[in-house]
Image: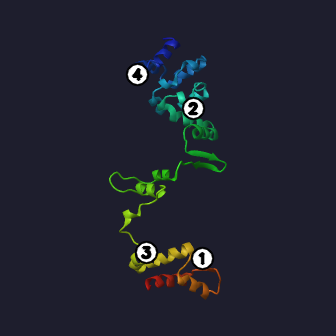
Amino acid sequence: MASLDRFIEWFHSGYDEDFEKVLKVFKRTRNFLKLVASRKMQDKIDIGYIPNREFKNDPELFNYLGENGFLDNVSYTNIYEEQKNYYLLWLIEKDQTEGLKFICDNILSDVEIRSDGYWLKLAGREELAEFFRSYSRETSPEDIAKQVFSEEGLDYGRFWDTSDDVYVDVIETLDGANTEILKKYIIRHIGNQDLNIENYSADFFHELMKSQGREDFFQITDNDVKNLIDDFFNC
């Protein structure tokens, strides 16, 4: 059988046929690396020459590299691109806190670690638009979000044909079933709780507050919400 140095040479040749010579004898990459480790020759191995298929065939192979000294002199910056994800997963599995800290400090420029967790750090609010869906040929949610979050704000001229009276164009068109859904929605979100009259200018709310014999605050009950909607319908 060829010497270990010869197998290491084939391992680093970059040719599939030479790598197959190694596998023909050792069957698995890990078996070859075990012999290397037993001879304390880990520093002679460049893990970048391990084909990606070997990591897929042996999911724990990268952990083995880390546990047996093959990664002692390896850093993220000089590791091969195809193996960087394996390296990061190994860091997290070894020590989740330190692994995530390394990722946030060295790879993700927009994540900040605080005492209560991980926070997204943005250069500007318009970057939030990336979280909205994008279309290629028509106005998309991402396009609208970019305008909303921009310094200039939304160009309302593009929406000239939308409603300027929500009660006439939306509420009046509801049928009986949808009106009931609206009533339940109002009660669920603002019903049966104190509301400050300063936030409500319509006469209906001022009359409601007086009928409840209160000052500054009022509540909307199940009966009130029916009158509220009927009041808008009869404006």
- Please state if 235 lies on the left or on the right of 118 as rendered: left
Of the residues under marks 1 and 4, which one precedes in the sequence? 4
Q: Residue 196 in the image: x percent, y percent?
A: 61, 76
**Mark 2 Cα-neighbour bin, 10 Å: few <14, some 14–19, many ≥20:** some
Which residue occupies the extreme front position in the image?
Answer: 152
**Amino acid type shown at disc 2:** Asn
Q: Which residue is mark 2?
A: 63
CA gap between label 1 and label 4 equals 77 Å
User: Eyeballing the image, is 26 above or below 54?
Assistant: above
- The residue located at (61%, 18%) in the rendering is 40
Of the residues under marks 2 and 3, which one precedes in the sequence? 2
**Amino acid type shown at disc 1:** Glu
Tell which tag, 3 or 1, sits nearer the viewer. 1
Q: Residue 228 in the image: x percent, y percent?
A: 50, 82
Q: Which residue is mark 4?
A: 16
**Mark 1 Cα-neighbour bin, 10 Å: few <14, some 14–19, many ≥20:** few
Disc 4 and disc 2 in contact, CB within 8 angstroms: no
* Mark 3 secondary-structure assignment: helix
Q: Which residue is mark 1?
A: 198
- The residue located at (48%, 84%) in the rendering is 231
Let me know if residue 114 appears in the view: yes
Tell which tag, 3 or 4, sits nearer the viewer. 3
- The residue located at (43%, 83%) in the rendering is 233
Q: Which residue is mark 3?
A: 166
